[in-house]
Every structure is written in structure tokens, then in C-alpha cells.
Amino acid sequence: MNNMTQNLVSDAVVEQDRNHVWHHLSQHKPYENSDPFMIVKGKGVRVWDAKGNEYLDAVSGAVWTVNVGYGRREIADAVRDQLVTMNYFAQTAGNVPAAQFAKRLISKMPGLSRVYYSNSGSEANEKAFKIVRQIADKKYGGQKRKVLYRERDYHGTTITTLSATGQHERRHQYGPFTPGFVEVPHCCQYRAQEDADLSNYGVWAADQIEKVILEEGPETIGALCLEPITAGGGIIEAPEGYWPRVQEICKKYDILLHIDEVVCGLGRTGTWFGYQHYGIQPDIVTMAKGVASGYAAISCTVTTEAVFEAFKDDADPRMGYFRDISTFGGCTAGPAAALINMEIIEDEKLLANATEQGEYLKGRLHQLMDKYQVIGDVRGKGLFAGFELVKDRSTKEPVDESLTVAIAAHCMANGVIIGRTNRSFATLNNNICLSPPLIVTRDEIDEIVTALDNALQTLT
Ligand code: PMP
């Protein structure tokens, strides 16, 4: 961190924030002398707080969003030009950047062809759920309305997307939940279920999905919604054998495969989309965060032509079409920013950088694991990595959450912002998460790892 700091905003602004803004995921305490944490400037992989302290942001805006890094004038210029030409008209009509971005996006997603715009990951998932329910009515006489989701996955903040979320601390106090969402077991090999077949865990974990389908009745299940790599639930990549079996099960029971790429989409794991590592063909893909790297709010629900076609029939012209609208899905800033965002990822070869630097980061984390017994497992793919902290490697007993909090605070005091699992499970808030912007260099990764090393040295 740069010690020669100078306030970047006035005390009055800090006070306005302290007195009137309700921060997300934060417990506000009545400490008169504690300044709120305000980020006021960003450039590349770095951000500055109100006091002028500089940080390397190893989590892309705290929640894996700013994929192309901060301060991209070319995105701001494109958005500005678009706004003065045409800022908004509801998506009941088309607009130029939305058309151009849709074409560009689906060129990266073979087998998918339609883009439905909205504003957040939660909303994109909610659209997918509505699509599934309406298809149940249109094609299956009202059956096949249920959606399966996986333990440890997260799909959003609204009551219905929380109903489809397998993180129990996040759901706590917010019920009753929307009916029709059914949980299937997680696929984290390090925390494998007691009766699991560890010799073939990927296939075993996928088979647990089939078990749930058979218990519920395949005729009642419309879709299976999965993160390609579980993000906030602890950076979990499914073991080999899982995805082909998942695809097979969906085909066998005529269940739509909905992949939630809100975090992994747009290059985070080294491919355009996380699912593309596994050779599967989803029916619905949702995305948000990295689509415009946080330069504008945008999310997309992308479907196959077959899903789109299901809404085309003229049998019920009054009620049969997808009767959904998202006011701000008509904002042109989102797709205008997304177009340039995608161009940057291509021009600067950021998929390759995510793969290369991601390998390096994982290697460095394994070195830390060799040095510190407290690291029980290192996981991730591309620039999406994390590790679990345990009291004892043989029992795998998780450390108390206070240690992950202290490690994050130590890194921050040393100028590096890292992530951690936060209120996802009572016992598994023991994960450290890293997802730096895709432009990160090897030296910057060294900086991140040095901060972690110092924190672990001091605190464990
Ligand atoms: N899906 C996943 C996998 C996410 O991680 C998130 C957000 N962390 C969401 C959906 C919800 O996105 P949003 O916060 O934009 O509604």
C-alpha cells in the first residue's frame, strides 16, 4: 500500500456515506470514529479508497465482476456516444447495440441463438425459471414445473432465486420460499458425502441428481440449474465424469440444462464460458457480472432456438408468448459497454492470459499449501481460485470464520483485497477466494501471494 496518502474525497462525502448509505452485506456499527470503506478510483487492477490508500484488487470489484480491469476509457466513450444517440427504449423494440452484442455473443456459444436482456444475475436466472414454467404449461400440460438446483450453488438475491440457492446461511430468515425448487447434492470431492464412491466421485455425484429426479418423478422436473464451477459456495469444480453424466441424465428425462455463468461467463476460467471446458450443450445460459465488467448493468438469458420456438405458437396469441418485461433491459448502455468489453477480451487475448496466469496462480497457491498446514485444499480454474482452511488436514475440520476474516483484513492492510466465503454455510465460511481482473500479470500475482503468505505467517 502507498503510505503517502492524500484524501481523494472530502470529509463531507465520507460523512454522507456514513450517515445515509446502507452498504450491502455489512453490519453497520455505531462507531463514531470509524470511516466507511469507500472506493473512489480505479485503474487497471488497482483501486484507491477515500483516504488515497492504494489496493491491488484480487477479486475484481469484490464480487468477480471487473474482468477487463478499471478505467477503460474506450468503454466509457462507447457508452457516452450511445447514450447521447439513444439511451433507452423498452426491449419491446430493438436497439442497435443490443442487436450487435447478441450476434457477437452467440457467435461464442455454438448451439444457442437467442438473447433476452435484463439487469442482474438474479433477474437473468428468474427469467430462466419463468421460461421453464411457461414451457411446462405449453408442452407438458402443466407438469415439469420444478427446477433442480445444487447444494452449495448460489443463483441470486431475490426470494425465488434464493429458493433455488443451496447456501443455507444466505437463506436464513428470508423464508417462506417459492415452491417448486428442489435441491440435489453438491459435488465437492474434498467434502465428499459419507456414502460416496470416491473411486468415481464425479459420476457418483451426478448419479445423485438422477436419484432426486426419480424420487420427485421425472414428469415433474423441467430444468436443472447448475453453476459450471460453484463460486460463492467455495470454488468447486466438478470432478471428471460429472458433466457427461449430467448431460446424459437431462437428455434421458427431457430436462432442460440451465447453466448459471453469472461468475464464470466472459473469460473468468480461460474459456468464454465455464461450461465450455466440459463439452456439454446447455439449453439455457445466464450471465451478468463480467458481461460489461461493471461499466453498465446488463444480464442475459441465452437460449437455444428450440426454447425460443416453444413460445412462437399462435395457438394462444393472448397468453402464449413470454409475458415478461424488464424495464432496464432496454437500457442501451449495457450492450454498448458489453460490445467493447468483448472486443477488449479478444484484442488483448485475455482468455489466454486467464489460462496462463491462472496456472501460475494455482501453482503459487500449492506452494503456500506446502508451507502452511492450515491450507487443506486448493481449487479453481483460470483466474478463479481459492483454498480451504482447516484446523487439521486429517479431520478436515474447518477453521473458525474469524481466521478467514483476519486473513482478509491483514491482506487489506497490506494493500491487497482478497475474497472469502461469507455467510454461505454455518461451518464452511473457511474459504479464501481469488479472482483478479483478467489483465493481471505474473508480478501482480506474486504481490497477491506475498500478501497471503505474510497473513498466514502472522496469523497461523
Ligand atoms: N449467480 C451466481 C453464480 C452469482 O454468483 C450471483 C452473484 N454473486 C448471482 C447469480 C446473482 O447475480 P446478481 O447479484 O447480479 O443478481
Image: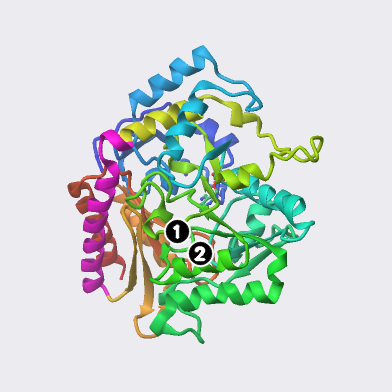
Q: Sequence-wise, which precedes: disc 2 or disc 1?
A: 2
Residue 360 lies within the magenta run: yes
Tell me, for residue 247, which label it has, or none: 2
46 relative to 331, above or below: below
Q: Note whether ligand 1 is within 8 Å of mark 2.
A: no
Tell me where the magenta segment starts and ends, as one range: 345-372
Rendered location of residue 326, percent (x, y): 65, 34
Q: Is residue 355 above or below residue 238?
A: above
Q: What element carries label 1?
A: loop
Asked whether the beta carbons under mark 2 and mark 1 sit within 8 Å of each other, the answer is yes
Residue 340 location, x and y as percent?
A: 38, 29
Instruction: Check disc 2 and give the amino acid type.
Output: Gln
Residue shown at 34% from the left, 32% from the top: 343
Residue 458 location (% of width, % of height): 27, 65
Q: In the depicted view, which residue is nearer to us: 404 or 141?
A: 141
Please tell me whether residue 80 is drawn above or below residue 122 in the rendered image. Answer: above
Residue furthest to the top: 85
Please name the residue shown 45% across and 70% down the image: 242
Dominant secondary structure (helix, strand or loop) of the stretch shown in magenta? helix
- Magenta stretch: includes residue 415: no
Residue found 75% across the figure and 50% down from its top: 138
